[in-house]
Image (tube, grey):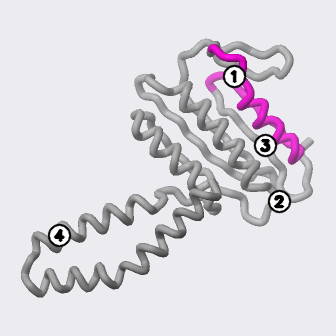
Amino acid sequence: HINEVEKLYVDMRSIKHDMANHIQMLKTLVEKNEIKEAEDYLSHMDKQVQEIGLSIKTGNPITDIIISEFDKRFKDDNIDFNSSFFYPDNSKIDAFDISIILNNSLQNAYEAAQGLDNAYVNIRSFIKNNIYIIEVRNNFEKELIRDEDTGLYLSAKDGDNHGFGLRNIRTVAEKYYGDIDVEVIMPVTFICPLLNNFYI
């Protein structure tokens, strides 16, 4: 994700550098009354800008990229996606830790909602009583199995590695004295206190 952010900024600097040339070219085309060519050129420029820009702003470049990547994936698979996620200001929560939570929770939601009629995934974050909460909701039709050891739900999916995503989210939450709460037909919630306050 850091590499993707660096590439994004390089692309933006490159576009800015070339902008003067683009503007001069458009002026020349308009002066020569070559309106169709000017419109085509402008359309091409607009497409380039859209490709390097991120449609979702969360307050952190790492989480911007994660949410934007999933937004594109959901749209490509006709899954309705709504995000009101924000990265908490002035907190000691590491962006890398947040990325673990986002990647795992949104991947789980994507797999669960894939192929459903009226599929949806919603993510939001908010602060309540100085506690930072991330909530993910999605619909699903797959069979769920409750892990007796962890109390977390698993889908009846083949593979020995399945189920690590929620455990990884729990590990991150516990690092900040929080936890994960998984409810069927209700939100998946990550609870993390801000700064040095503890949630008990």
Q: Amino acid at mark 3?
A: Ile
What's the magenta region? 158-185
Which residue bears the numbered disc 3?
191
**Percent coordinates x, y for residue 46 in the rendering:** 31, 66
**If you read the primary sequence from the N terminus, does the residue marked by circle 3 or circle 1 appear first?**
1
How far apart marks 4 and 1 lie (CA) works out to: 51 Å
Q: Residue at x 7, y 81 (%)?
A: 33
Residue carrying label 4: 39
Q: Is residue 164 above or below residue 143?
A: below
Return the residue at label 2: 92
**Based on the displayed image, in which of its 4 quarters is residue 88 positioned?**
bottom right
Dot 4 or dot 2: first in sequence order is: 4
What amino acid is found at the position of numbered circle 1 in the picture? His
Residue located 70% across and 25% down the image? 183
Observer-nearest residue: 72 or 125?
A: 72
**N-terminal-most mark, 2 or 3:** 2
SS category of the residue bearing label 1:
loop
